Amino acid sequence: MRLLHTLPALTLMAAPAAWAQGAALNLTLQFSPLAAGGGAISAVPVGGAATWWAAVAVAGGLGWHLRRHRLAGAMAGLAAGLAVATALLTSAPVEALVQEQALEVALQRSPVSVDMSGAQRHVMTFRNDAGQAIRLNGVALAGTDQAAHTIWRWGAPVGSAPRCEVGLALAADASCTVVVAPRPQVGEAIQVVLKDLHPTQPSVGYDQIYYHLARKQPNAARFEPGTSRYDDYMKDTVGKRVSDYCADNGLDDVVAGSFVPETVKLSDASSFACKRSATEVEAGGLKTVVVGPGGQLYLTDGHHGFTTLWELADGGPDLPVWVRVTGDFSAAATSDAFWQQMVATGNAWLYDAQGAAITPAQLPAQLGLANLRDDAYRSLVYFTRDLGYSNSDVSEFAEFYWGAWLRQRVALTADTTLHAGADEQLQAAGVALADGALVTTGDAGYLALVRDASLAMATLNAQDVVAGTRTAADLGKLALPAKASAVNDWNDILEELGRNDIKQSGDSRKGGKAWYAKRYRQCGGPPSTQAACWGAAS
């Protein structure tokens, strides 16, 4: 059943202040015409056969549609160089919107009021039928329910039309969309796209990202399709890529058999299935954001994982991800006040890749390796996981605190960091027990550096301060290996870091993180694009 409603007409004019005061929720769009060269001119001429906009709203399984309506009768040019289109969204029982509503609007007098529940999501598409190009000068909410709602600026745009944002130029007959929804609450999971997220740190450990980019983008021609070697290889590479994407988005794991390894794309949600649906997102394990002034989302955890997704061939800045809101500082009066809150709550890392202090203005605006610098100490800390520390329950930026501590104790040079040079850099290194004392074996190469950094971390007492007020225990310090079984575990981890991805039998296996990162540097890219280079090392 389709419910048809005819509403009072709306004349394009400046919205009286009383509207905003009396309305539950008021959305106002202001725009001015563009001259041929792109500049604004004084008035929008609207002819007698002007056609206005289509608006579509979807709330769960409910939709309402404001359909295009041809104006019968002439309209005067707009004064003061501005036209204001106002839709008033007022509260009503949700039962009144059980089925789709088609709303026709005649633009002759104002206001237009649409009865909707204040808790619903409203998606409106505005069409420019002014007869010439226009530029949006204002998109704003007002009304008694304004504090509980926001203009949703995150996630993929609705349909093919861009978002209606200040400064947007719309050609004649072009459209843009506005989404009005309840403000995200602390603890809530929301879906965004990667380019919505503003970093709160200036650097990452490239080698951690190189490991993921190398492992998750295989050379599909390396093994014969249909063989166990091929199946194992694709499971450990493509399967890892899709499985991690599901897990990082609170969707459990990928459904076995739901994707074709050769054609699956993270950017195409129809090419695979996760075990949880979008209505079953597990928020607890999601990467985290803080809402800042203007609704900007600041990423506080997940720079490495999301930069990996940004750089993957089937990822990119428009890839959807789920995040959890852990703070809302959008009411901060100034930018300085906002960043003071961020620093005070441990939600920003304002030190560059060399350990020097920076200002918030020096942070990059977006994720991606083109924007974030390489911190070699942060990479080193990544490889000490499960040796010197555990990252299972630590605070934001824990690895950077460890990196700052190691920076004062371990000298990294061009020769000792991972580089594109000889594979001997990953020669074996380990530990052993001699008369009850822990001794080292193999003292050259990068794995020896990882071992020594891990030993230094594990030697600390739990209450020793690592950085600021954070103790070794706060940052997940592990104990030194004191028994033969623990020594064996340590050596297994170190050996695995440097091993390649193929057994002596020729079968595929999971390669080591440091090996993948080094090979990525040597080959200048992943196996999917540098097959000859990667194959030569297998």
Image (cartoon, rainbow, N blue to C red):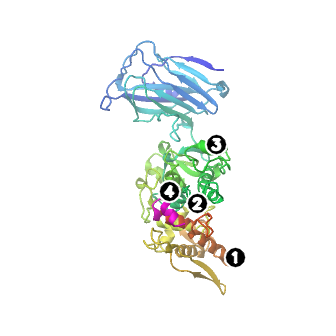
Task: Give whichever of 210, 262 is nearer the camera.
Answer: 262
Residue 522 inside the magenta-drawn segment? yes
Q: Is residue 483 visible?
A: no
**Considering the numbered disc 2 on the image, is that residue within a helix, a strand or a loop?**
loop
| Dot 4 alpha-carbon crowd within 10 angstroms: few under 14, some 14 to 19, many 20 or more | many
| Dot 1 alpha-carbon crowd within 10 angstroms: few under 14, some 14 to 19, many 20 or more | few
Is the residue 403 above or below the residue 68 in the image?
below
The quarter of the rendered structure image containing the N terminus is top right
The amino acid at mark 1 is: Ser
Q: Mark 1 or mark 2: which comes first in sequence? A: 2
Disc 4 marks which residue? Answer: 348
Question: Which region is colored magenta?
Answer: 521-538
Task: Give whichever of 344, 43 is nearer the camera.
Answer: 43
Task: Give whichever of 416, 31 is nearer the camera.
Answer: 416
Q: Mark 1 or mark 4: which comes first in sequence? A: 4
Q: Is residue 139 visible?
A: yes
Q: Mark 4 or mark 3: which comes first in sequence? A: 3
The amino acid at mark 3 is: Ala
Task: Give whichever of 433, 237 is nearer the camera.
Answer: 237
Give the CA distance from mark 4 to mark 3.
29 Å
Give the CA distance from mark 4 to mark 2.
12 Å
**Considering the numbered disc 1 on the image, is that residue within a helix, a strand or a loop?**
helix
The quarter of the rendered structure image containing the C terminus is bottom right
Residue 395: which numbered mark, if any?
2
Residue 330 point in image, percent of width and height: 51, 45
The reply to whether callout 1 and callout 4 are in contact (CB within 8 Å) is no
Residue 501 point in image, percent of width and height: 58, 65
Is the residue 59 above or below the residue 272 in the image?
above
- Position of residue 45 in the picture relative to residue 411 (left or right): left
Q: Mark 3 or mark 2: which comes first in sequence? A: 3
Give the CA distance from mark 3 to mark 1.
43 Å
Disc 1 marks which residue? Answer: 485
